[in-house]
Image (cartoon, rainbow, N blue to C red):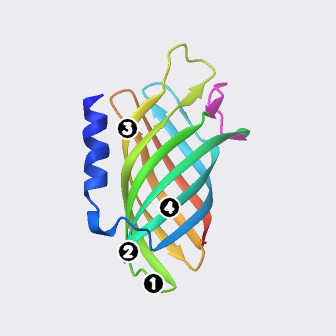
Amino acid sequence: MLKKILFFGFILGLFNTNALALETIYTGLQVSQFTYEDNFVEGEPAAVALRLGGYLDEGTAIEARFGFGLQGYGDTASGVEFDVEPFLGLYGLYHIGWGSNASVYGLLGVTNGEVKLSTATTDTRATNISYGLGLNIANFNFEIIQYFHDELFDVTAISFGFVSAF
């Protein structure tokens, strides 16, 4: 628990405390193809994520995401069904090229979520450090993110979406 508290404090500390007034608030919607891998099975369930964020200054943003799986969409492997349970995350983003028609960004944050397997008998819900890279062109974005990585399983996602300022 202390690790989670320290990490959230680190994320919030990345931002200048004088700039806590949000300059621009934005919302977004992403469709994601997750990839779940462990020592025994691999699958690719689909999910949707809602995004709400705000720019603290030029190029720096903080963003919350809420996502859920699309039951019945995505790959199954060897008769195993995968489902992305609701997940929630908080991320810091830094954009290069912010203010132009296109920007590249990196993100770092924390995600709490779960990918359920029809064959699993244990709880795979986890809270983990997440990181990734993205590209915004006009109001559209493409992103690759590592949501979970530990000794038991990895969960990554490739996402396409739409972002719009308020």
Query: Which of 98 and 25 lies nearest the eye of the viewer?
Result: 25
Q: Earlier in the sequence, mark 3 or mark 2?
A: 2
The secondary structure type at the circle numbered 4 is strand
Image disc number at residue 128: 3
Which comes sooner in the sequence, label 4 or label 3? 4
Q: Amino acid at mark 3?
A: Asn
| Label 2 sits on residue | 59
Within 10 angstroms of label 4, few (less than 14), some, or many (20 or more) residues? Answer: many
Q: Which mark is residue 30?
A: none
Q: Residue at x 31, y 53 (%)?
A: 12
Q: CA distance from mark 1 to mark 3?
A: 31 Å
For marks 1 and 4 on the same chain, the one whose residue lies earlier in the sequence = 4
Q: Are marks 1 and 4 in contact (CB under 8 Å)?
A: no
What residue is rendered at 25% in x and 55% in y? 13
Residue shown at 48% from the left, 27% from the top: 125
Location of the N terminus (image quadrant):
top left
Q: Residue 103 or 72: which is nearer the viewer?
A: 103
Q: Amino acid at mark 2?
A: Gly
Q: CA distance from mark 3 to mark 2?
A: 25 Å
What secondary structure prevails in the magenta region? loop
Tell which circle, 4 or 2, labels the residue nearer the N-terminal end: 4
**Quarter of the picture holding the C terminus:** bottom right
Across and down, in percent, residue 31 comes to 64, 54
